[in-house]
Amino acid sequence: MKDPKRSKNEIERRLREIAYELVSLNEHPKFKNKMSLEEKISKYSTRWRNLYIEGSAEICLYAEKMYPSHSGESSRTAKHGILLMKIAHDCFKNFKPEDGDFINYISHVICIEFAKSEKKEITDEMKGGIRYSSSTEKIAKSFIKWTEEYGKDSQSIKVQEWYCKYVCSDLSVDNLNKALRLEFETNVMEETVSTDEQKDVSIFESFAINNDYFENEEFDEEKYTTIFNKIEKTFQKQQLRTKPYISALITFNILKEIEKNEKTSFHIKISDLLAKYAFSDQEILSNWKAGYDIGRQKDICQRFKPDLSIENAESDASRTFKKFLEKMN
């Protein structure tokens, strides 16, 4: 395997080279269009096979850069070794130059697939762990409340270890991590804006796009250009002082809706279109495209209104976004 001490930029540069060279197999005169990646690699030369193997190793190193291990614990990459090899194969097999930058493509796939695998793993556990339930929620919320009360960093491994050793001695650090991860991811995926009738509303439903249809559709640039133009027109009418906050909320909610579609090519194309608009929060969008966590609506509110409590921040974010949607109608 390559030197793990290399910088992230070096690994990214080599990954791009390998990806585009493997993609060039599609243009080679010896290959038929319907041949699979496996057939192309095995029937041509050892060079392509070696490239594929090197590329898979580079993706593992890149994942380590995305999710570095904490002291005394294995990294997420180590826990998902087999899944990561499948991700590498699928990405080399399915990536197309029109999908954009290979690094954005692979990092987004890693982020989504790791989260899906971990959620399933936690949900399926029946012994030696916990399932998503009211007790899971209680574990996570009790810990968060304790960290807020004493001004501790809930993401710190040392804080989590202290809590499990001295505050809640019957809880293991591993199970605390699982409870936090599951509670957080569930809240993120289900976070919506409520109307007076408590009916869930999404930004795309405001344009009469049915969720079932959205989950399976292909990217339609003309349709989403029309939607984004209308959002942009309403956004430009907002007060200057509130625009950064509203921009972050709009971008967050659009990205969470995009995630309902599992096609990576869809993610890349629509996010590239989104980047062209003034209402788009470029920092949130950039982090999302790179596969990083973009938090929750209440986190966004507290960034702009740090004096609000967590409970009030969540209400404020939902209310602000709901008002913006109403102005578009």
Image: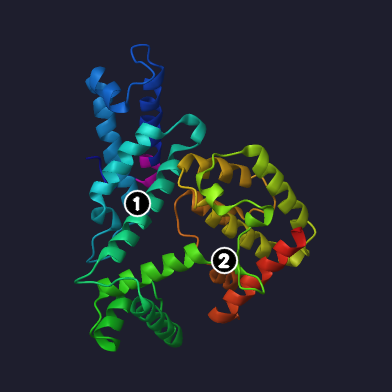
Q: Is residue 157 visible?
A: no
Per the rendered image, the range of residues in magenta is 7-11
List the single residue furthest toward the top: 29
Residue placed under numbered mark 1 in the picture: 65
Q: Residue at x 25, y 43 (%)?
A: 3
List the single residue furthest toward the left: 128
Estimate the x, y position of residue 246 in percent, counting from the top left: 67, 63
Number of numbered labels in the structure image:
2
Q: Is residue 156 left or right of residue 318?
A: left
Estimate the x, y position of residue 40 in percent, counting from the top left: 30, 21
* Tag 1: amino acid: Lys
Q: Residue at x 40, y 43 (%)?
A: 106
Q: Observer-nearest residue: 161 or 254?
A: 254
* Tag 2: amino acid: Thr
The answer to whether 100 is drawn above or below residue 168 in the figure is above
Q: Residue at x 49, y 35 (%)?
A: 99
Q: Is residue 238 left or right of residue 284?
A: right
| Mark 1 closeness class: few <14, some 14–19, many ≥20 residues within 10 Å | some
Residue placed under numbered mark 2 in the picture: 192
